[in-house]
Amino acid sequence: MNKKKEIVALENGNYRIRVKDFYPDDTSGVEFTEITKEMLDVLMEDIRRQKKQEMADFRYLVPFTADEIKLAEMEGKIVESCEEWYCRKLESQQLHHALECIDPQNRMRFLLYYVSDIPVERIAAYENIGESAVRKSINRTKKKLKMILENMNNDDMP
């Protein structure tokens, strides 16, 4: 289902977006948020990139029937098996929960850098702070996420 995203231009030049439209797994309870034009551009580019990848993946699998896909998985032609997909999904959910433990500003810097491939220089210019402050924030966030994820994995062990 391709639902239209709610984006409203505000008088101050910013935009109001529905959080669930861009972050379907968000559990913060915030329905709407205000963002800048630059941030909206980043979000829309990320969506375009995801859709392009989905189409490329779909085009790759279309010529195969379900049995052929299973056979291709067994022969190693399609690298990711169902088990690998499940593990990746589980890791993704754990990362999502870990990211919720990070304060919003550091989380945004981390996501802009690692998910949206925005260079440190652009993040620093956007926030009007020094590049070293952004780098330190991203590195601290990475270390904290690693620690949170390790604790989650240790808690799951019998």
Image: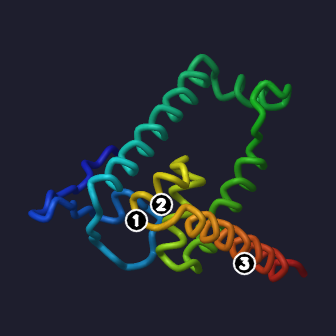
Lower sequence index among marks 3 and 2: 2
The disc placed on residue 148 is 3
Q: Are there few (<14), some (14-19), or many (20+) residues within 10 Å of tag 2? A: some
Residue 115 at x, y percent in the picture: 56, 52
Judged from this view, the residue extending furthest toward the right is 158
Seen in the picture, residue 140 relative to 75 is either above or below; the reply is below
Q: Mark 1 or 3, which is nearer the eye?
A: 1
15 vs 32, nearest the viewer: 15
The disc placed on residue 124 is 2
Q: Residue at x 70, y 27 (%)?
A: 69
Q: Amino acid at mark 2?
A: Ala
Q: Are marks 1 and 3 in contact (CB under 8 Å)?
A: no
Cα–Cα gap, marks 1 and 3? 29 Å
Image quadrant in which the C terminus is located: bottom right
Q: Are marks 2 and 1 in contact (CB under 8 Å)?
A: yes
Residue 47 at x, y percent in the picture: 41, 44
Cα–Cα gap, marks 3 and 2? 26 Å
68 vs 149, nearest the viewer: 149
Residue 73 at x, y percent in the picture: 78, 31
Lower sequence index among marks 1 and 3: 1
> Where is mark 1, residue-wise?
128
Q: Amino acid at mark 3?
A: Ile
Q: Residue at x 77, y 48 (%)?
A: 84
Seen in the picture, residue 61 relative to 5 is either above or below; the reply is above
Q: Is label 3 in a helix, a strand or a loop?
A: helix
Q: Is label 1 in a helix, a strand or a loop?
A: loop
Image quadrant in which the N terminus is located: top left
Q: Residue at x 47, y 57 (%)?
A: 123
Asked if residue 56 lies left or right of residue 48, the reply is right
